[in-house]
Amino acid sequence: MPKKPLRPCAEISCGNLTEKAYCKTHEKIGEENRRDFTRKYNRYGRNPEINSFYQSSAWKQLRSMAYNRDNGLCQRCLKQGVIQLAHIVHHIVEVKEDWNRRLDIDNLESVCHVCHNREHKGTPRG
């Protein structure tokens, strides 16, 4: 399989070409930017009650149970006959829509990043 073409570093005024978003010189800046974005989103963009739920041991245990139940495979890809590893345990009915179903294992499915992003594409945050 051919390699991806090189592209310019995402750092302003850096002309170095790289396979990733940032060149070797600036990759630390990229990691810091990602961490800052995630920290700010979790602090200001996400509902604090929902954010604390996703940090709870009850959620972590249930997420592990759902992942094991689905054998670590993306359930949506599997329905199409494609075997793909799951990376996310997804709430079918979102937590912000029905708080009472947040710990219902029947409301969870293991999905890959592509299926998860397809599910949330164009959905407003908040």
Image (spheres, helix red, strand yellow):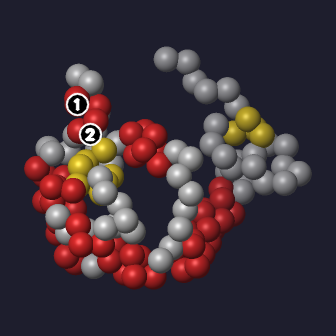
Residue at left 55%, top 62%?
A: 125
The vertical placement of 124 against 75, above or below, is below
Residue at left 75%, top 49%?
A: 10
Residue 55 visible somewhere in the drawing: no
The vertical placement of 106 against 43, above or below, is above
* Residue that mark 1 sits on: 78
Residue at left 37%, top 65%?
A: 97
Residue neighbourhood size for the residue with mark 2, other residues' Cα within 10 Å, grouped as few (<14), some (14–19), many (≥20) = many
Residue 16 in percent (x, y) is at 79, 42
Residue 52 appears in which quarter of the rendering?
bottom left
- Kind of residue at disc 2: Cys
Residue 125 visible somewhere in the drawing: yes
Residue 98 in percent (x, y) is at 31, 67
Instruction: Name the element at disc 1.
Output: helix
Q: Rounded to the nearest whole Å, what is the CA distance between mark 1 and mark 2?
A: 6 Å
Residue 107 horizontal side relative to residue 113, left or right = left
Residue at left 42%, top 44%?
A: 119
- Kind of residue at disc 1: Leu
Residue 6 appears in which quarter of the rendering?
top right
Residue 85 in percent (x, y) is at 28, 39
Q: Residue furthest right?
A: 13
Dots 1, 2 in contact, CB < 8 A: yes
The vertical placement of 32 against 66, above or below, is below
Q: Which mark is residue 74?
A: 2
Instruction: Report the front residue among 90 and 21.
Output: 90
Q: Residue furthest top?
A: 1
Instruction: Name the element at disc 2.
Output: loop
